[in-house]
Image (cartoon, rainbow, N blue to C red):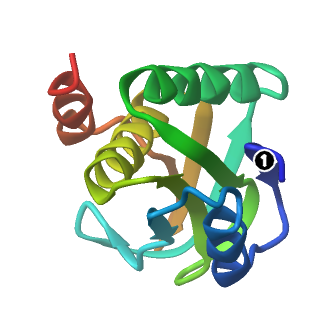
């Protein structure tokens, strides 16, 4: 199982969890996060979200985030999937999963990876809204979430 996938096709979260669970006989905990395309952002209805990335650079950035998580917590397996292309409301956009011997490490590492995906990984998001489209700006809340890990 690769640690990182950037893909346009959807993913099976159940299968990903099964792979994390079976990655090691020592697995005692699996924590995951699945992000979904929201129907409203900044008070406007959203009909689609289009994601672009910088091939090679994006994977390198995510690998660095995973390495940092592995240095902080005793992880057994990590899986990050991020979709690109045009996605409809309620489609899956991102999956972050980790396995470890204990739940504390799994919960913390999963949240850490997701916080830094939002702030360090080079993805560009454009929403289609009533009357046109707009690029999605970084959120102050995402920066604050990542800052707490320093």
Q: Position of residue 29 (x, y in %)?
A: 43, 64
Note whether residue 120 is visible.
no
Residue in the image at 60% along x and 74% along y:
92
Which part of the image, by quadrant, shows the C terminus? top left
Query: Residue 72 falls in which quadrant of the image?
Result: top left
Q: Secondary structure at mark 1?
A: strand
Residue receiving disc 1: 6
- Relative to 14, residue 30 above or below: above
Q: Position of residue 25 (x, y in %)?
A: 64, 61
Q: Position of residue 58 (x, y in %)?
A: 70, 28
- Badge 1 crowding class, 10 Å Cα cut-off, few under 14, some 14 to 19, many 20 or more, is some
Q: Nearer the viewer, residue 104 or 136?
A: 104
Q: Residue furthest front?
A: 25
- Relative to 39, residue 112 above or below: above
91 left or right, relative to 143? right
Note whether residue 150 is visible.
yes
Q: Nearer the viewer, residue 79 or 71?
A: 71
- Relative to 57, residue 85 above or below: below
22 left or right, relative to 101? right
Residue in the image at 44% along x and 35% along y:
74
Residue in the image at 72% along x and 42% along y:
52
Residue in the image at 54% along x and 81% along y:
89
120 left or right, relative to 4? left
- Relative to 132, residue 70 above or below: above
Q: Position of residue 49 (x, y in %)?
A: 59, 63
Counting labels gives 1
């Amino acid at each position: 199982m690769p640690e990182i996938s950037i893909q346009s096709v959807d993913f099976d979260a159940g299968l990903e969890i099964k792979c994390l669970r079976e990655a090691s006989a020592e697995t005692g905990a699996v924590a995951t996060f699945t992000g979904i395309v929201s129907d409203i952002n900044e008070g406007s209805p959203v009909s689609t979200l289009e994601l672009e990335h910088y091939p090679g650079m994006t994977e390198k950035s995510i690998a660095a985030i995973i390495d940092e998580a592995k240095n902080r917590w005793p992880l057994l397996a990590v899986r990050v999937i991020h979709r690109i292309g045009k996605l409809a409301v309620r489609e899956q956009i991102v999956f972050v999963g980790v396995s470890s011997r204990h739940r504390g490490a799994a919960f913390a590492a999963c949240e850490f990876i997701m916080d830094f995906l939002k702030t360090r990984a080079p993805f560009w998001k454009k929403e289609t809204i009533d009357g046109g489209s707009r690029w999605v700006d970084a959120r102050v809340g995402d920066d604050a979430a990542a800052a707490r890990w320093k």
